[in-house]
Structure formats: structure tokens, C-alpha cells
Image: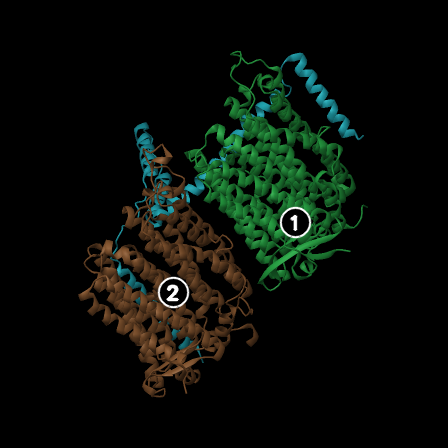
Chain colours: A brown, B cyan, C green
Amino acid sequence: MLCAVEHFPVLIIVISLLSAFTIFIAGWLNKKSCCFISFATILVQLVMSIFILHHVLTAGTINYWLGGWSPPWGIEYVVDALNAYVLVILLFLALVCVMYSKRNIEHELPHKIVSFYVLYQLLVTGLCGVTVTGDIFNMYVFVEIFSLSAYALIASRGKIALKASYTYLILGSIGACFFLLGIGFLYSVTGTLNMHDLSLLLPPLYGNRMVQAAFGFFIIGLGIKMALFPLHTWLPDAHSFAPAEISAMLSGIIIEVSTYAFIRVCFSVYTVNFLKLLPIFDILCWVAASGIIIGSVLAIAQDNLKRMLAYSSVSQMGYIMLAVGLSVSSHNELWGGLTPALMHILNHALMKGCLFLVAGAFIYKADLWNISDFRGLGRKMPYTCAAFSLAAISMIGVPPSVGFVSKLYIILASLDSGKFVFVAIMLISTLLNLVYFWRVIETMYMKQEEGAHDHSSSRRDEVPASMLIPILILASLCIIVGIIWLAEIPMPIMDSVNSLFGLSGGMT
Amino acid sequence: MMIDEILMYAFVVFWVAWVAVSKKEPGRWLIRFCEGPLTTFATFIDWNVGRMAGFFVWFSRNPAAALSIKGEEMKLRVEIPGVTPEKAAEYERELEELRKRQPVGEPMVRLNIGTAMLLVLLFIALYLITILIRGWLAP
Amino acid sequence: MTATIESMQPTFAIMCPAIVSILILLFGKWPNIRESWTLIAAIAQFLIVISMAPVILAGNIIECTFFTMLPGVDFGFSVDAFGLIFAITSSFLWILVSLYSIGYMRSLNEHAQTRFYFFFALAIFGAVGIAMSGNLFTMFIFYEILTVSTYPLVAHEQTPVALAAGRKYLAYLLTSGTFFLAAIVLTYYFSGTTDFVNGGIPNLASEASRAALMVLFVIFLLGFMKAAWMPFHSWLPTAMAAPTPVSALLHAVAVVKAGVFGIIRVVCYIYGVDLMSALGLGLALVCLATFTLIVANLFALAQDNLKRRLAYSTINQLSLIIFGVALLSYEGIEGAMMHIPFHGFMKITLFMCAGAIMVASGKKNISEMAGIGKKMPVTMIAFTIGALGMCALPPTAGYITHHLFVHGCEEAGGSMTIFPYILLIVAILDVMYFFPIIYTAFFKKSKDGGDRRIQEAPIFMLIPIAITATVSIIFYFYPDLFYISDLVHTAISGLMGGHP
């Protein structure tokens, strides 16, 4: 007998999908209703995901057999602490973005409101699907769903955005192909697509060339999707030209969910034993470290705010991948295993979400794209700029913000693995972050507008409340969540993930 | 009372007496040394640190372009300027112009699918090579 | 022996400026209410802080812990005698500087005053937090808050010069912050704790190799660039672009003292005196401090801008504190700890005088100040007292600490016995650049006959100046004012037992 919560994984996807069609129909009748339907759906999904998280932590993993078919014949949805955690983050950011989008989309895409929300809801469906599924082919299908909606959403502004979307489309499809090839290889060797089944069947075959090649395909395929450093080339264009909330989702969630998929493949399909067989994760650390530095250096060069943030995302993905790379070799109970990586997934979603929404607010209000045009904004839009400063300070890693906590844990993890180089890399990256974020803060607050000598001349001109509230929520969470991390409140989730994958300190 | 304290009072008395008599502060040479060479040296160091920081930001605008500019500058420096003063002047002018050149910022939109695909292919090639080599080397 | 008392007092003291910073923002439109909040909070904070002194003097430690950050590292406050000295100094001077800045900001009709007061309160929040934190991690959090919150104060003028100064300030101090973090994490990695322990963390020496400890100490020093030791000092003179109240409180007391406070914490409470001398780091630190002592004074001689000259004097005096603690002897450390409040009072007098001169006459350079002593007698007499203190002449507080440093050198023995003579040279250099200012102000006649309109600065500015100058003298006769010398003795007896 399943209790109600155990139906939630599938319900989350079904209501999301249904809502997409409802929006399509309701949008014909009344354009204004789209946003509310979307908001309500995501709110319900979020509540469900919180119940799921609670259930997973108290009662253990949820296994839901779709249509009652038992695996490996049917599709299985498996929700453990890792997916539940990612699910909550993704739905929370989606909720905040949809709240923000109401006014922004009316302003930016007045003729495409309906299609925007339909696609947005499909995007959320795809992301949730990737997160809850326990079947690797099903995961591929959902990856395609969210990618396709993302291509369309990025292109929605038309003109130059079409080019950006095209780049992403080509590269994303290449990535998906690799992912599919990897799945095909595994299927040909084992004859199953269920992740749990795979993890049981694979260990004797770890020496098999086919299985190893499949892993390579997974890394490259998902590496493109999550903009791992040398494969990040689609990201800056896509981030710069998408509407603000989509940039926020792209940077805060889409690449993170791809990272989740990568973690899932590494630890649930393959296992820690396979990763210890080959020095893949050591190489991954170095790739991530170069990504951190090069991403930051390129960010310094940008004058376009959203583009700068995009490069900063490349560098932040480096943080996450560095933490993933260190996860096998650091065994501490607190900062060992996947803890720093998962921690930074949440932290990056909060910080980057906030920053992109603020960038969108500047565009909404005054069509300001370039940092050099931000003179005197600190007086015109005090709340928005304060939110930006908070998020930027937390990107730099000033305590007690979320950025500081991630930095601290990654440093501790690299010390724990005996890789002192990465401590230096993290510290250098802090300074680089300082250089490019402080430039923005300085321009906003300290540089005066040209021609305006009287300070009282610039009047307050804030964005509407429905856009301001999401920004402020995210900005304040940057500090609050930092303190929550420092107080180690969410650690049970991390411990549960680590013990699931055999990574925790207790297991060694 | 210790000896250094007495010396200290003696100096204060000396200073006051000197000023009272000559209306000038004693130790002009020391002050001049501080105002002259010492300050110059300090500013020089400070300026160089600032220049290094500036160079870093300049370099990061577009590393590839910045590297090529620096390379050209090096090449010009290595070449020996001609004996005639005109040539030397021209050489100086070229060097000066080169210094003024800024690396252009990256283009806004780049369709570098080709690069990315090349990278991907390279990765696969590398990967397959490592796998193959491992296969050959393994007993 | 020492007992640990759980109490919320430290939290209340720290929260005073945090709460008032929000009130300042809320009441930004009403300057009078805004400023009275600052004053009320400053007084309340001082009263709370000083009320802890009797408890601490009885040999207790006041602690309040909130949560565990990492195993063995709690986020919480722990007030011991040494921390309380710093807290008393900064909270008392905050009252005076608040008064002073009301006069200063209003007479110059400065812009963005709400922002100024807001970040000022935040900076005090950081400083008192540093004073009361019980381990390095907590200290780091407040250390960074202090750095970031002072940036808007340094760049307050928003002119290109001020912006450049702010950028330099941030570049130096946040870079040093990352070194500090690295050092903390390494310490934690080696010993599993970062708590301040009397006499040093016990297992640090056994867990880390000799070379590692030396490298770690260098990283720590790089982390304390706030102490402005040479050659990493150049942010401090540049930061003098800030309004004078900021230079006064932050660059004579809060920020720079946070740096030396940290160094003393590391030397005495992380490494411990025994380990320091076993590693030979004491002598290295003394040499570094001596270098800064002399070179900073030479630079000071070359300055004509009064505030810049005072800035170099600050660099010199900070190194004096580092020098004292590096002697690793009872009286050296006593002098170092005592010099934190003493120098704070004297230097703040000097800075406030410089500000008063600027407000009253608009003059910034010493060469322009001929004859100003007759127009502004109160200010210049206070200045003279402060200057005497810098030159370690009686009857000022500076004399006492100078005396302690000299005794400390002799107590340390060995090669340290030559250092009293270096201190003498330093004091002579001090005389050479402070006495000309007094001479110019009182005895030189200005060439244009003097501007008749120049008169004393507003009363809001004169009162704090008079108070700090008086306190600087009172310290000479009665060093136990605000429990300072008792607290110092309590702190040192905890560190090294009784007086040798």
C-alpha cells in the first residue's frame, strides 16, 4: 500500500504537463490567466516536492513503478535524498522566476505571452522529469524535452537571439547525441536501461572497453549540457540574449540539473568503485580548475552585464565540478563526498538567479545592458542595486554569505584530498570575482551620472513589486541560507546522499 | 631613568634650542633625502604595482589579441634598428604605436560551433587513444 | 581559576550597532533622529561592554555560543581580557567620533550622510565582533564585514581620487582576507580547532612540521595587511581620501587595530609564546617591525599633507605594537596590549584636530598652517598633547608604553638588547616630524598676515577632541582608567603566569 506522498513523483510531472496544455487553451481565452496558472502549478509542485523531501529523509527512498510495471520492464521513478533536494531547489527557483516573469514578459514579449508560458511549463516538466526518473533512457527523453523548450525560449526575443539559440541547438543536440550513444553502448552490453539494474550488472564489466567508452560519451555529452569549461562556448550567447527569467533558469537550474544528471550517471549507474579504477575525477578536477580561472578572466573582459554573468557561470560550474571531482577522494564526515558540490548547486542557483533577475530589471526599466551605463543607478533603483550588491558580495565570498560557505567547504575538501593546488585556485578565483563584481558595484553607487552634479536630481524609479519581491527574496536568501549552512542544518540531506553513494566518512 | 630616556630629552632640548636660535628645523638633509630619493623610490614601486594590475586587466580583455600585441612588441625590440636616425625614429614610432594598440573586446556573438565540434572530436580522439594504449600496454 | 560564564551580554554589545544601522536607514530622512540613534547606540554599547569588565577581571570568560560551524569550531562570542580592551577602546571612541562626525559632516554639508552613518555603524559592528570572537573563523567573518563596510566610507567623496583609493583599499584588504582564510583553514586542518587558547593551541606544534608552521605564520601575516606593515602599507595613506571621522576612527582605531589585534591573537593565542620562540619567529617579526618602524617614519618626514603624515605615523605606531608582541616577553606584550587603547586615544586626537583645522580653515597642508595655533588654541593644544604622546614624552600615555617596550627588550635579553636604541632613533624621528607642526602652528607667522575669519571649529567637534586629549594625559597618571591596565595584567597572567 503506497501512501499519498509516494505518488507525488509522478504527479509532479503529470500536473506540470497537463498545466502546459491548460495554459495553451486558457491562453486563447485570456492571456492574463497564463501566468497565474503557471504560478499555481509550480507552487503545488513545490509543496509536493517539499513533502517528498521530508518523506525521503524520514522513510527512505521512494520507488514508483509507472503503470505498475515492475522494473526492469517498466519505467521506474526513484526519488532519494539527492533528487528530492535538487527538485526542491529547481521548483523554488522556477516559482520565483515565474513570479518575476509576469511584468517582464508583458513588457518584453507582449505577443508571445501564451507560448512563453507553455514552453516555460514544458521546461519545468522536463527538468522535474530528469530529476525524478530512475530510468536512464527516460532521463534522456526528459533532457530533450527541457532542452527543446530552452532552445525555443532563448530564441523568443528574435533577431540576434535566434543565432544564440541556434548555437545552443547545435551544440545541445551534439551533447544529447553523445548521451544517447552512451546509453546505447550500455544497453548493448547489459540489456537494461534501469539505473539500479545497470549498477548491479555493470561492476563485472568495468574492464569492458564498451562500458568505459560509454562513460566517456556521458562525460562529453553532459559536459556540453552543463557548460563544462572547454565545452561552454554556447553558454555566453545563450545567456546574454534570453529573457531575464530564462537566463536565470539557464544559469541557476538548467546547467545544474545537467550536473545532477552527471552525478547520477557517475554514482548511480557507475559506482565509486569504477571512478576509483580510472583517474577520471583527477582529470576532471584540473579541467574544472582551469574553467574556474579562465571563466573568471573572460568575465573581467566583458562590458555587457549578462555576458559577464554568463562567464561567471562558467567559472561557477567549475566550482561545482571541482567539488564533484574531489568527492571521491575526500572522506570527511562533514565536507567529504558530494556535500560541497550539492551545497554549491543550491548556492549558485540563489546567487546567479538573483543576479540575472537584477540584470533583467535594469533592462526592463531603462534598457541598460552595459556596465559602463550603470552610473547613478544606486540612487534610482536602490532596492534592486542593494540586492545586486548582496548577491555580488556573496559571489565574492564574503562571510557569512552562501558563496563563502561553498568556498570554505571546497577548500576544506581539497585539503582533505591533499590537493593543495586547488586551495590556491579557489583563493585566486575569489580575487578575480572581486575584480569583476566590484567594478559593477562601484559604477552603480560611486560613479556619478554625467552632467548630474546635484545628487537629488535623480529620482527613484524602481521596478514593479512583482519583479522586486523575487529579487529581494533571492538576495536575502543569499545571506540567510549561508547562515543555515554554517549552522549545518541541512546536513542530514547531504549525509543521506553520501551514504547512498558510499562516499561518506563513516563508510571508509 | 635609563640612558635612552636621557638621550631622548637631550634631543628634544637640542631641537627646541636649535629652532629658537636658527629659526630653522634641524636635520634638513634627512628631510630632503626623504622628500627626494625615498619618495621617488616609493612612488616608483607603487606605480609599478598599479601597472601590473592594469596590465592584468588589459590582458584579460582578450588574451589572444593581447598576446599577439605583446609578441609583436617583443619582435620589434629584438630587431636592431637601422643606423640612420630616420630609421631609429621610425622604429621608435612603431614601438610607440604598438604600445597604444588595445586588444579589441570579444565579439558579441560568435558562431563558434566549429571550434566546439573540433574540441569534442579532439576529446573523443584522445579518449579512444588512451583506451587503445591502455589496451596495448595491459598484459 | 578561570570560569566560563554563559551570558548574552557580548551579543547585545555587538547587536547595538547592527540594530542601529537599520534604524539609521529607516530614519534617513530626519537627520536629528538619525544621529541621536547613533549616539544612543554608542553609549548603550559602551555601557554594556564596560559592565563586562568586573566579571572578566575576576578571572572569568564570558561566552555565548550560537551554533557549530564545523566540528570543533563554534560560531559564538567569547570575551576575554584582551578582547575586552579592544572592545572598550572602539566602543568608547565610537561615542566621541559620532559626536565629532555630526559636527564635521554638517559643517562641510557632506552628501550621502545616511549612507555614511549606516556603514560607520556596520564597521563598528565588525570591529567589536572581531574583539569578541572566540575563534579564528568567527573573527574572519567580522574581519571581512569590516573590510567591505569601510569601502563606501573610503570612497565617500566619489571623486576619481576617492574611487581609486577605495579600489586600492579593497584590493589590498580583500587579498589579505583570502590569505587569512587560507591560514585559518590550514590551522584548522593541522590542529582541528581554531579557538583562542591561552598559550597557544596545544597540538599545533605536534601536528605540523617546523617548516609548515613557519609558512603558516607568513600566510597569517599576509592575512593581516590591515596592520599595514611594510611593504604592504600603501593602502593606508591612500585611504586618507576618506572624510576625517573615518580616518580617525577606522584608520587609527578600528581597521588597523583589527590587524594588530589579529597578530597578537595569532602570536599569543594560536602559536603561543613558547612555540614562537622555539621557531625563532619572534626575532623575524621584530626585524620586520623594526624595518617598518624606521621606514614609515622616514616617509612621514617627507609628507606635507597633515593627514598623510599622520597616516605614516600610524603605520609606525602599529609596528610598535607588533614589535612589542614580537619581543615575546612579559613587558613587551604588556606594552603591545596597552598601546592598542593608548595609541587609539592619542592618534584619534591628532586626526580629529586635522579634521577640525580643515573644517575651520580649509587647510590640509602643514606648510599652510603658520600661525593657526593662535586662532584655534584648543585644537592645537590638543594636537600638541597627541604629538607628545607619539614622541613618547611625558606626561602622556605614549611614555608608559614606550617604557614598557624598552623594558621588554631588556627582559627578552640576547640580541634584543640593541633594540632600545632603535626605539630611541624612532622616537627622535617622531620628534623631527611632529615638532615642526607645533612650531609652525604656534610660532611661525603666516605670510599673508592670516585669514581673520578663521576661528575654532564647531563645539560638537571640540568636545570630543578635548576629551580624548584629556584621557591621553589621564592615562599617564592613572593607566587603570576604563580598567585598561588591570585587564592587560589579567590577560598576560593568563598567558605567561605572574610577572617574572
Q: CA distance from mark 1 to mark 2?
A: 43 Å
Residue named by callout 1: C265
Q: Quadrant of residue A284?
A: bottom left
Residue C20 location (% of width, % of height) = 53, 45
Q: Chain of mark 2?
A: A
Q: Quadrant of residue C384?
A: top right
Left or right of C250, for residue A187 = left
Identity of the amino acid at label 1?
A: Arg
Judged from the image, the secondary structure of the residue bearing numbered disc 1 is: helix
Left or right of C356, for residue C407 = right
The C terminus of chain A, quarter of image: bottom right
Identity of the amino acid at label 2?
A: Phe
Residue nearest the observer in this picture, C165 or C383:
C383
How many circles with numbers are drawn on the protein?
Answer: 2
The N terminus of chain A, quarter of image: bottom left
Residue C14 location (% of width, % of height) = 59, 49
Judged from the image, the secondary structure of the residue bearing numbered disc 2 is: helix
